[in-house]
Structures are given as C-alpha cells and as structure tokens.
Image: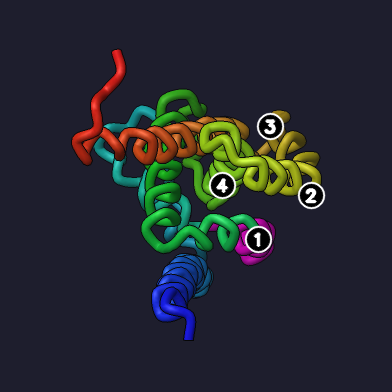
Amino acid sequence: MHPRGPALTRTSGALSETRKAGLQLLIAMIAVMWLVEIVNTLDSNGLDSDGIWPRNVGHLWGIFTAPFLHASFAHLISNTIPLVFMGAIVALRGAGRLASVTLTVIVLGGLGTWLIAPASPDTIGASGVVFGYATYLFARGFFDRSVLEVLTGLIVGVIWGGALLTSLVPHPGISWQGHLCGGIAGVIAAWALARRREAAPAVTGLPARL
C-alpha cells in the first residue's frame, strides 16, 4: 500500500464525520422548530408573544426564542425549505461552523431587529436566519478568496435571490427589518470567520507584517 494511504483515509474519515456532525446539528435545529410549533398550535399560539419586542429591555431574551417560533405551519414550511437547502451547505463545514454562523445571525440580526423594528407586534420566525445563511454563502467566497465558494453563493442567489429581495419590500405582517438585519449579520459572520482563519498563522510564531 502507498505509505500515504492510511493518512488519506483518516483525513477523509474525519472530513466525513465533520460533515455528518454539521448536518445532525441542522436537523436538530429544524426539529426543535417543528416541535415548538406543534406545542404552540396545541396552546392556541400562546407562544407567539415570546418573540422580539423592539426596545423592550425586559424582553431582550426574545432574540434567542424568536427564530424558533412561527405564526403557523405554513410560515414554518416556508422557512424550513430554504433553511434545509442553505443550512446544509453551511453544515458541510461542520457543526462548529454552522453553530458560529447561526449564533452570529441570531444575536446580531436579532439585536438589529430589536433596535429598528416597530414597537409592536413582536417579530417571530426563522426568516432572519434564512437571510443570514444566504448572505453568508454569498459573501464568504469573497472573504475566503475561493472561486468555488463564490460560485456556490451565485447559485444560491439565482435560486433564492428573487424571493429574498422581494421580502425586503415592506408588506403587512412581514418584518423586512428582520430580513435586512439577518442579511447584514450573515455578511459579518462571513467576514469574522474568514478573518479568524487568516489570523491563525500569527499564533504559530510566524513574523507579522506591519
């Protein structure tokens, strides 16, 4: 056997496990959304008030619960489809990458919505996360200087771009603020994760350039 064979096998196996862990996390997140919606429906949508209430400091925790709450199963389905598609692409980098992107979008996108959305009603739904995934996938190729990732982002844009841009137009009952802030947070996530990777050589003791 070629002496590098075992090492290549181990590397391939580790990559497979990384992707598997990422996809498992994505499935778990979506499963929680569906479980919450079942409970919410049985409770006559009593959980709908646990979303983001803009500028309400006492209800700031709603930033973390809002993405897992939906107004109906139709609302949940409309978010689940792009979440599966785009989330799976993000998850191929592993559970850590998916968790980092998701948390960045939820926190920064949620805070942005909390700051600029109308005082009422509250904002619920995972569409902000959908926008965050979309802009992350579109922007990461430019920050990582990867042609493959740029092409991936373009494919996402071709498939979902029209629907996403339409969602930025104000409509009754639709939080364009949540979409916009989620999209901005996705770009920030792409920048932050790329910068972290580029900064890694400095830790190894390589000289820094001024």
- In the rendered structure, does residue 82 fall within the stretch colored magenta? yes
Residue 136, compared with residue 45, is above or below; it is above
Give the residues drawn in magenta, as a range: 70-84
Q: Earlier in the sequence, mark 4 or mark 1?
A: 1
Q: Residue at 66% across / 41% down in the picture?
A: 147
Q: Earlier in the sequence, mark 2 or mark 4?
A: 4
- In the rendered structure, does residue 108 fall within the stretch colored magenta? no
User: On the image, numbered disc 4 is attached to which residue?
Assistant: 133
Q: Residue at 55% across / 39% down in the picture?
A: 140
Disc 4 secondary structure class: helix
- Left/right of residue 199 with respect to residue 119 in the rendered view: left
* Residue 3 percent coordinates (x, y): 42, 78
Mark 2 vs mark 1, CA separation in Å: 10 Å
Q: Residue at 47% across / 41% down in the picture?
A: 122
Mark 3 vs mark 4, CA separation in Å: 15 Å
Going by the numbered disc 1, the residue's amino acid type is Phe
* Residue 44 percent coordinates (x, y): 51, 67
Q: Which mark is residue 168?
A: 3
Going by the numbered disc 3, the residue's amino acid type is Leu
* Residue 61 percent coordinates (x, y): 30, 45
Answer whether labels 2 and 1 touch (C-beta < 8 Å). yes
User: On the image, numbered disc 1 is attached to which residue?
Assistant: 85
Mark 1 vs mark 3, CA separation in Å: 20 Å
Q: Mark 4 packing: few (<14 Cα in 10 Å), some, or many (20+)?
A: many
- Left/right of residue 145 with respect to residue 17 in the rendered view: right
* Residue 13 percent coordinates (x, y): 44, 77
Mark 2 vs mark 4, CA separation in Å: 14 Å
Q: Which mark is residue 159?
A: 2
Disc 1 secondary structure class: helix
Q: Earlier in the sequence, mark 2 or mark 1?
A: 1
